[in-house]
Image (cartoon, helix red, strand yellow):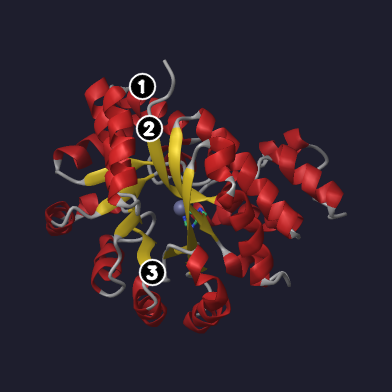
Amino acid sequence: MPPIPKAELHLHIEGTLEPELAFALAARNSVELPYLSEAELRAAYSFSDLQSFLDLYYALMAVLRTEDDFADLADAYLARARAQGVRHAEIFFDPQAHTARGLEIGTVIEGLTRALDAAEERHGISTRLIMCFLRDESAESALATFEAARPYLDRIAAVGLDSAEVGNPPSKFREVYARAREAGLKCVAHAGEEGPPAYIWEALDLLGVDRVDHGVRCMEDDALVARLAAERTPLTLCPLSNVRLRVIDKLADHPLPAMLDAGLLVTVNSDDPAYFGGYADDNFTGVRDALGLDDETLRTLARNSFHASFLDEETRAKYLAEVDAH
Ligand SMILES: Nc1ncnc2[nH]cnc12
Ligand SMILES: [Zn+2]
């Protein structure tokens, strides 16, 4: 049976950098990596929390230098995603992680959009691009990044917020989100991964987000769960990521079933699949096996992914029919 059709809504393109491609790009760009082999690099993928992952994630980005590098990275992801049943992908990128290394934001956006523009024809996947601000950088840096991206806003569907969560609440980014909304962009934000439920409230009330990325810690706050359920605010869960970053101990402990029972519009996604041991369908089969989810629940999760997407209604209906026919 082929994998169920699904949308991937929480995917950092830099988190799809597999060791093989990292070494190939390092050679192409004469960048020296502090690892002797792909196996040695993979052995370093043992994380104690979000920060320990981010340290390696940002370090490895040194191999990404040219438009071609970003195009190759995105194309490699899209090929893997299609093999996992992904029909639509809304893809994060972290411009500040690249401009801080001296790259032009245009190099990043042109490279990524070259691969994304070809995705429908090459891989049968529709795409959107989501520009994330690094929340451990300043509000001024986020604003400057948004202004640098203005010439490219026709390629960008939404803004997002990622990186080290605790101590960097959504309230810090009120102004840049207001500017993004004014420019007609959708808004999402990581909230309630390591940070408290209060950060989810802030993302809703102060940033006006259309979706919450992760949001697992909403389960600590009944009033928040009631609000998210009543407003049908989507949550983009990343189960394998949660285990690797020790947000939960093991997949069998994941609150996903309780979240469904609470009426939340939850979706299953892969976050940084090269680092966390699985792409989109690996996350689906992971929760199916660990939590004993039946076929109807998996279909609900697949349908949710399209309902929670930023697709136009006609394309959404086409994909939902594919789920029903699966
Ligand atoms: N899981 C995650 N949380 C916050 N920032 C990230 N950047 C890449 N992956 C992330
Ligand atoms: Zn993420």
Residue 115 as seen in the image, left or right of residue 167: right
Real-space Cα distance between discs 3 and 2?
A: 34 Å
On screen, residue 6 above or below 112: above
Quarter of the figure that contains the C terminus: top left
Q: Nearer the viewer, residue 74 or 221?
A: 74
Residue shown at 23% from the left, 34% from the top: 257
The quadrant holding residue 2 is: top left
- Give the class, few, some or many, for how many residues have Cα within 10 Å of label 3's Cα (few <14, many ≥20): some
- Between label 3 and label 1, give the one nearer the viewer: 3
Give the labeled residue for mark 1. Answer: 289
- The first of marks 2 and 1 along the sequence is 2
Where's the N terminus, which quadrant? top left
Q: Which residue is mark 2?
A: 251
Q: Earlier in the sequence, mark 3 or mark 1?
A: 3
The circle on residue 185 is: 3
Instruction: Give the CA separation, mark 2 to mark 1.
Output: 9 Å
Q: Taking the image as drawn, is residue 46 in sight? A: no
